[in-house]
Image: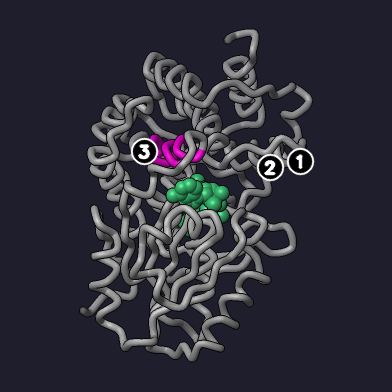
Amino acid sequence: MEYSSTHSEIIYSVQPEVDIESIIRQYQPGKVFVVTEENVFKLWFDKLPKLKTLPCVVIPSGEDNKGLGSVELIWEFLSSKGADRKSLLINVGGGMLTDLGGFAASTFKRGVDFINVPTTLLAQVDASVGGKTGINFRGLKNEIGTFNVPRSVIISSTFLQTLDQQNLLSGFAEMVKHGLIYSSEHFLELCNVDFENLDLKSFQEIIRHSVQVKEYFVQQDPTEKNIRKALNFGHTIGHALESLFLEQHRPVLHGYAVAWGMMAELYLSQAVCGLDPESSVDICDWISSMYGKISITSEDFEELYMLMGHDKKNEAGRINFTLISSPGNFEINQESSKELIFEALRFLQNSLSHENA
Ligand SMILES: NC(=O)c1ccc[n+]([C@@H]2O[C@H](COP(=O)([O-])OP(=O)(O)OC[C@H]3O[C@@H](n4cnc5c(N)ncnc54)[C@H](O)[C@@H]3O)[C@@H](O)[C@H]2O)c1
Ligand SMILES: [Zn+2]
């Protein structure tokens, strides 16, 4: 099948192996390879017998392994098994693995085909679609990477059966972001998700709606020159929180930092973009009911402000925000005074403090 170099085919799959097989058949025997990581291999590969027969390299799990050492393992594996430019690499795992495998495939012999089979919610709705691949380098996140789309992404909520609640919520935050920036309908359906009794079959449809939002922005602006920045909502403050908590040896999952970042940026959205205060308060209450409490002190504000200044998305030294004027309507390239940012952080501090619980 012909496929575009800027657009992936996204397959919402009930039986991922069947869909993977129909892609494999388009390649010569012996030219299809698999990369996965330990947790996913242990949990899923006995249930994926066809994949298990293919040559496979298993990388240790966790973000610490998204580096050059693991890229080398994949390159060595491909090289020793005789992979050539007509080969296919199948990446099976969370965002760590799809970023890593995508990068290894993009650079091996100047690029071989790859497909992503995302197994975490975060990877399904965010990391595995959109064509950003990459690895961490010298302590800097995603410092080295490429823009290169997988030929297909196979999304199946089946994999979420084994995912823990925290990682589910981490991915869910990106879905909330998609609803808030672009689709009030999607946002409303997310408000009705019941994690206690999650029906994975209907959740797959909700995942599809979320991916459609991400795809919309990626197609309009594949290399993030302008409106793809909308996807940065919650991330300017979210990334700063993520780095701060890491420095303070109390790391949080990315989606939690983004959820709290969205709360602070909803506050900014009221002040800068005229977001209705009542809906802002309702959304913040809902977010904090899911993502819980964490303490931030006033002494952290300067550090957070400095960290925001280091965000990759800034231009000409200005801190760049994506905000919303109402649920479903984003505004990119927004600015805020330092005073207002501190006010937003104070709001967040009060909302997340245990005294308010
Ligand atoms: N390329 C992009 O556009 C983009 C966007 C967002 C995030 N990312 C990247 O994604 C990464 C984070 O992704 P993530 O949250 O999926 O992390 P991850 O891949 O580390 O997975 C989180 C944990 O879940 C485990 N796991 C994976 N699938 C599982 C399953 N089905 N059942 C049980 N456990 C499972 C993993 O072993 C790991 O312990 C970061 O490296 C981030 O930079 C990339
Ligand atoms: Zn994110």
Residue 274 is situated, as x and y percent measured from the top left of the image, at 40, 24
Q: Is residue 229 visible?
A: no
Tell me: is circle 2 under 8 Å from ligand 1. Answer: no
Residue placed under numbered mark 2 in the picture: 243
Residue 279 is situated, as x and y percent measured from the top left of the image, at 37, 18
Q: Amino acid at mark 3?
A: Ile
Secondary element under disc 3, as helix, strand or loop, is helix
Residue 241 is situated, as x and y percent measured from the top left of the image, at 64, 36
Compare marks 3 and 1 and give the one earlier in the sequence.
Answer: 3
Up the image or down, 247 lies above or below 135; here it is above
Which residue is at the front of the view, 68 or 187? 68
Which residue is at the front of the view, 226 or 125? 125
Quadrant occupied by the C terminus: top right
Q: Is residue 199 visible?
A: yes
Tell me: is circle 1 under 8 Å from ligand 1. Answer: no
Q: What residue is drawn where x is 55% and y is 33%?
A: 261
Quadrant occupied by the N terminus: bottom left
- The question of residue 62 being in magenta is answered with no
Marks 1/2: CA distance?
A: 6 Å
* Secondary structure that dominates the magenta span: helix
Up the image or down, 267 lies above or below 126; here it is above
Please name the colour scheme applied to the rendered image: one colour
- The question of residue 172 being in magenta is answered with yes
Residue placed under numbered mark 1 in the picture: 247
Residue placed under numbered mark 3 in the picture: 181
